[in-house]
Amino acid sequence: MTHAGKADAVLYVKDLARVAAFYARVPGLEVQTADGQAVVESSQFPLVVLQVSNAIASTVEITRPPVRRVESPIKLVFFVASIAAVRERAAALGGALNPVEREWLFQDHKVCDDHDPEGNVVQFREVRRSP
């Protein structure tokens, strides 16, 4: 999918395949890859995932489990059908979501934060269902 005139986000990563797989399977985005990059997108949002150079990668340590990069001023936000389902997929793919007790409500959405496989902070929002 190519979307002219749409805002993108760019995420620089050490392990392109692992992080692209996380964003493809957790919020369910479509992946298009090319040498050193992946575009992972929905009809509303394209995320460009770029592999950092070997020189930069050698200076970056990603622990397992990764340490959340809380000092970054950027947070990616994805709208999903089920935070519970996302929590399971995230854990299976090297990321994590905060426990249910740390979810909150914001603008008619249930919201939960945590991180991808490299510690980048990400948020998932689920539309609240009317009773």
Image (cartoon, grey):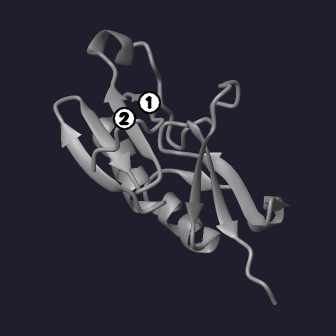
Measured as percent of width and height from the top left, residue 34 is found at 17, 36
Q: Give the residue type that dot 2 points to.
A: Val
Q: Give the residue type that dot 1 points to.
A: Val
In the image, residue 66 above or below residue 36: below
Residue under the image location 54 percent in, 39 percent down = 66
Q: Secondary structure at mark 2?
A: strand
Measured as percent of width and height from the top left, residue 21 is found at 34, 52
Q: Which residue is mark 1?
A: 10
In the image, residue 95 above or below residue 16: below
Measured as percent of width and height from the top left, residue 96 is found at 58, 54
Q: Which residue is mark 2?
A: 49
Q: Which of the pair 97/26 is nearer the observer?
A: 26
Residue under the image location 34 percent in, 38 percent down = 4
| 71 on left or right of 59 | right
Q: Which of the pair 72/54 is nearer the observer?
A: 72
Name the quarter where the C terminus is drawn: bottom right
